[in-house]
Image (cartoon, rainbow, N blue to C red):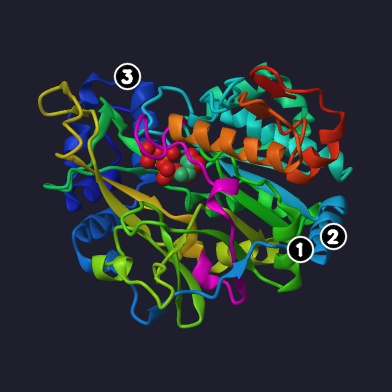
Amino acid sequence: MTSPPNDLLTRLRASEQEHVLLDWDSLDNDARATFVRQLAAIDFAQLAALRARVNTSADAMPANFAPPHVTPAAFTAEEKARGADALQRGKIAALLVAGGQGTRLGTLQPKGMFPAAPISGVSLYQLHAEKVFAIGCRYTHKLPFLVMTSPATDAPTRAFFAEHEHFSLVPDQVKFFQQGTMPAACPRTGRLLMEAPGRLFLSPNGHGGTLTALAESGLLRELAARGVEHVFYFQVDNPLVKVCDPGFIGRHLATESEASSKVIAKELPEEKVGVLVEVNGRCSITEYTQLPKHLSEERDANGELRFRAGSPAIHLFSVGFLERVTRTAAGALPYHAARKSVAHYDPHTRTMVPAPPAGEPNAVKFERFIFDALPHAERWLAVETPRDEEFAPIKNATGPDSPETSAVAQLALYAQWLARAGVETNGNLVEISPLFALDEDELAAKAPRLPAITEMTILN
Ligand code: UTP
């Protein structure tokens, strides 16, 4: 290929993106062909429209929103039994999203490989996989474990699972699939950023990319064909998540919900979690940046925050709902634009531009959010779960939501389980592996056989 195809040139000119070809002459034939394929897949008009929305009110709060109806997570024996039955009959799959770049944490590896357990230092991937393994043993059915990766996390994630022999899961039980990507643009000029000569700068298209990726990979069809009826969605950075919580599944089934979400009560108005709201009878999650300050601070008659239904990003979706959304509305899941600081290649100067300080973003990235699917659900459910039992995310390197706060929360929960089971720890720190006890009830059942705890201990 000596020169770029004419139709591509026309599209690039029309969208004022010709700079991407400045290095054309220095590329070899293979690189040219790869670059042409990459550019052919780009919808330039869509990108221009998205960028135009940065700093507009397009991401503003919808009108008519109210606090949602939330049910407490004290599940009945009947709900738990119903969920257990669904797990036993193979109706449930677990879906872990692990495509994010973890920029705030600042590790070079996928976040799932981060040592998260407070004493053993076991990785997030291992904790999640062991929960899935333990569920498979308890309910005598090896549920599918879907792991969504991105180009940045795919190869190291697969290698990590292989190296650890899939953490005792049957390899066929673990299904990796990759999410899509989106180019990034200069916020000032709208020009697409480059990663290297002949290569656009691409980033994962957000956790909302899960839905299209699930459908396009054929996995959604495969789940339906295997008789799976509901998918438990969770994020990689929360070691406390109760994967496939049977009570949650049972209530989801009993209410015939299409999309169920756990919520945790926000304690402070400025806490950085999305908030579940009800809009015209439908469920919606609004980002903390969108909720006006006066509303985030508003209190009800009991003195509690009125908009307190914080989202830990734990959902259950019916397969029928996922099929409908991906068939009819996936294209319509909106893109959100975020200003970020990124290192990239400048084809004009032929140099790498280092990432500026975080306060001076030089790029606009575009992401879809999973919670934009929620308003499509005709029947939905919100269940409040105690934060100390189910939410200790690792987002930042230090400060709130860091490895340190997460470790403290994990140890505090295990100490609580042990205390309530009557186990004397003599003030020693104890970590409980999912393989030893998946939940408090299992720990309580094993407690009478536990020896006295006289030193820092890992129960596994
Ligand atoms: P976050 O929004 O916290 O982003 O992801 P992140 O990429 O982990 O971290 P930062 O913002 O760069 O610091 C929440 C969850 O969504 C997944 C992440 O892997 C995490 O489990 N995610 C995020 C994806 O799977 N794909 C994406 O494109 C973005």
User: Picture quarter containing residue 397?
Assistant: top left
Instruction: Please tell me how many numbered marks the rendered image carries.
Output: 3
In three-dimensional space, the C-alpha distance between marks 3 and 1, rounded to whole angstroms, equals: 58 Å
Looking at the image, residue 157 lies above or below residue 191: above
Q: Is residue 235 left or right of residue 101?
A: right
Residue at horizontal 80 percent and vertical 56 percent from the top: 91
> Crowding near pointer 1: few (<14 within 10 Å), some, many (20+)?
many
Which mark is first along the chain, 2 or 3?
3
Which mark is first along the chain, 1 or 3?
3
Question: Looking at the image, which is closer to me, 151 or 412?
Answer: 412
Give the residue at mark 2.
81
Amino acid of disc 2: Ala
* Quadrant containing ligand 1: top left
Question: Looking at the image, which is closer to me, 391 or 65?
Answer: 391
Query: Badges 1 and 2: C-beta atoms under 8 Å apart?
Result: yes
In three-dimensional space, the C-alpha distance between marks 3 and 2, rounded to whole angstroms, equals: 62 Å
Q: Quadrant of the N terminus?
A: top left
Amino acid of disc 3: Asp
Q: Residue 95's x, y, as percent?
A: 64, 46
Question: Looking at the image, which is closer to me, 222 or 294?
Answer: 294
Magenta residue check for 392: yes
Callout 2: helix, strand or loop?
Answer: helix
Give the residue at mark 3.
28
Callout 1: helix, strand or loop?
Answer: helix
Which mark is first along the chain, 2 or 1?
2
> Crowding near pointer 2: few (<14 within 10 Å), some, many (20+)?
some
Residue at horizontal 77 percent and vertical 26 percent from the top: 168
Give the residue at mark 1.
250
Question: Looking at the image, which is closer to me, 287 or 356?
Answer: 287
In three-dimensional space, the C-alpha distance between marks 1 and 2, rounded to whole angstroms, equals: 7 Å
Magenta residue check for 8: no
The span picked out in magenta is 374-403
